[in-house]
Amino acid sequence: MQKKLLTIICLLVTPLLLLNTPCHAIDSATISVVFSSDMEAYHQAWEGLNGFFRKNGVALSVSTYNLTNDDPETVCSRVKKEKPQLILALGTKALRLLKMRIQDIPILACMVINQYDLGQANVTGVTMSIPTSIKLEWISRNIPQEKTIGLIYSPETAELATKILQDCKNFGYNIIAKKINSGEKIAEALQGMGYKIDCFLMIPDVSIYFPRSIEYLLMEGLKKRFAVIGLSSFYTRAGAFASFDCDYKDLGRQTAGMAMKIFEGKSLNEIPSESPYKATFSLNLLVAEKIGIKLTPSTIREAKEVFSR
Amino acid sequence: MRISIINKITFLFILLIITLSASMGIYSLRYGKQALISEFDDRAKTLINSLAIISESPVLFRDTEMLSKIGLGALSQRDVVSCEIRDANDNILFRKGTKNKGCVQEYTAAIQTEKIGDNVFGEGLILGAKERKLERIGKIRLTFSLDNIRHKLKNIQWVMVLIIVIGIMIGSISIALMVGFVMGRPIKQLIVDTRTIAGGNLNHVIPVNTTDELGSLAAAFNQMTKDLKISQERLVKAEKMSAASQIAAETAHEIRNPLTVISSGVYLLKRIVHEENPLVLKTIDQMEGALYRAANFLNDLLNFSRPIELKIGLGNINNMINSAIDELAESVLSGIEVEQKLSDNIPEISADFGRLKQVVLNLVKNAAEAMGEVKSKKLKVESEKEGDFVKIIVSDTGKGITQEQMAHLFEPFHTSKKNGIGLGLSICKRFVEAHDNSRIEVESELEKGTRFTVFLSM
């Protein structure tokens, strides 16, 4: 298992500290859990969090809601009525609903992508956005010949794009970034980049990426021989060169650590939002071959998923 | 104008064939037209939908080169006369061909692309959320010429008409021939046969060759002719009898009185003529004989013509038979071996013994005459009791009766004898049948003899 998992960086020593926190200080807690949808990943995260509390002997009194079936208004009013010690929002949809309606109960977010969604006094959590620095470090280590990175973003992801630009500069990469308003312009944007880029970083922007635009991007990558770094292993399977993923149970456990702090009475101001501790990656060897990237056997071994013939 | 039944049936069948063929033709034509239009429609829809799908990326990413290829490819398809591709803002991305070329039909399809659903956020892209929405990004319009399909329809129409006409002709001829052969011939034959019968030939028999209605009709005709013939014969016989009775009655009446006078004269003459003149005596005897035969003849005529009024009395059959045999012993039965076998256990019965005696006399005379030319002349008279009947049997060893004679044996004035008038057996039958439940039967074998049996009810 360790072979497949790549521990890129430990940003903080917090996890160790968390594990060593005297959990026995509390033995029960009330929590309301709101799922954005029925996606398996949300359930995995919840399983990780719940398992953490079971392991530490904390009995959770849980009320669960799912926005796939439950009416958002009803969910909010019930949660308000229950007044739990903590609300766990799984996914952006649940988080955006809860933070808009509830300001007097701590909200802990998990499985959200944007850092700015966590920007409210009663909200903190763990994003699933793997830091660009991790990705760039991996790129520089495994495909050092890549020098110019392409990026397309929309006004919605401008903030994230700025951060990526900064990170690229820090790592000494050239970057060609284009801002577009919709996915239809991706062709035009990629045309402008032409054969100048060696690598393309996808960002989670729903206004740019949809099936056809993703397909177009992947095809262009093959055609113009640049390595597309996708958003998850789905993209690698579809034709991206590589993608970074995080383990959703780990995310749940990481979120549980923050929840524990809240139960212990720490102020939310003292608990900043976090990025995933761990990241894994997947590789598409067919694409690598097609675009002329040679990977070392150790890199291939480290990959969690490898797609080949 | 007279139209024969065969022609009427044939006409009806032909009318039926025409109606059926025309209905089937119209139905087939409609079905064919619908199928053709449906096929055309399916092809057009399949083509335009396929084009809409393959145009998605080129429209989305403004790949005019690809759109041009798609458009030209569409125009190369059969019946496509124009192709137009527009984006979501109705800007023309490709247009070629002409719409004003005869009769046309337009088909339009939306070009759509799948977008991520409104409820999917950034993490949905990472997690592979399935929620999608379809967004219209343009449309494609194809114009199809209907000339080709019209031409095809016209061809189908002509072929169908031709098939129907040929079908009607062949069907009509076949039906005409079949009706003529199956029905016409037997009907014509039936007409000829019935005309023959209507012409008076009641002996004509219509051949019954089939078991169908015509066969039944022929059989019914034959039966009718047979019945008619029997009725006619009976009628003739009845008329003959009536006329004969009338003549007999009048003749007997007119002759009887003179005969009585002559008979009285002969009787007186015989008494006054001297016995020494044998020639005169002989002549008188001959006259008496002639008078006797004439009286007998008159009696027969009267018996035949008068209505029968039985004089019923109680008596013994055997006595009556003996009396009759005795009466004929010398005159009729000379040279004939007579055997009498009369049963002792016959009770006395009620009957008209005078008439019955006349019956026995007639039967014995008849038997004697039948044995006129045979060598062995044996007459046997029997009586016996059988159930409710008393039987009188008179049998001879004569020449017998032919089948033809047997059929008319009891008919009046029917005789095979040279001197007879054919009333004897007829009178016998009348007298016997005048008694309740009584009858007379005859059995005969050629060259062996004849046997008459009288059944008298007790």
Image: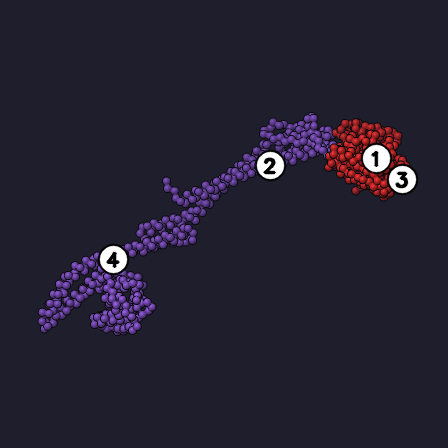
Chain colours: A red, B purple
Q: Mark 1 points at which residue?
A: A126
Closer-to-camera residue (A240/B385): B385
Parent chain of label 3: A
Determine which quarter of the picture holds residue B449. Answer: bottom left
- Label 3 – label 4 distance at C-alpha: 152 Å
Q: Which amino acid does label 4 sit on?
A: Met
Element at badge 3?
loop
Count residues near mark 2 (Cα–Cα under 10 Å), then give few for <14, some for 14-19, many for 20+: few
Q: Mark 4 points at which residue?
A: B241
Which-is-in-front pick, marks 2 and 1? 1
Which-is-in-front pick, marks 3 and 4? 3
In the rendered image, residues at marks 2 and 4 fall on the same chain:
yes
- Label 2 – label 4 distance at C-alpha: 92 Å
Count residues near mark 1 (Cα–Cα under 10 Å), then give few for <14, some for 14-19, many for 20+: many
Q: What residue type is labelled 3?
A: Pro
Element at badge 4?
helix
In the rendered image, residues at marks 3 and 2 fall on the same chain:
no
Parent chain of label 4: B
Determine which quarter of the picture holds residue B140. Answer: top right
Q: Name the residue under label 2.
A: B38
- Label 2 – label 1 distance at C-alpha: 59 Å
Q: Which amino acid does label 1 sit on?
A: Val
Give the percent coordinates (x, y) of residue A66: 76, 37
Q: Residue B16 carries which label?
A: none
In the rendered image, residues at marks 2 and 1 fall on the same chain:
no
Q: Residue A22 carries which label?
A: 3
Look at 28% across and 63% down and name the residue there.
B435
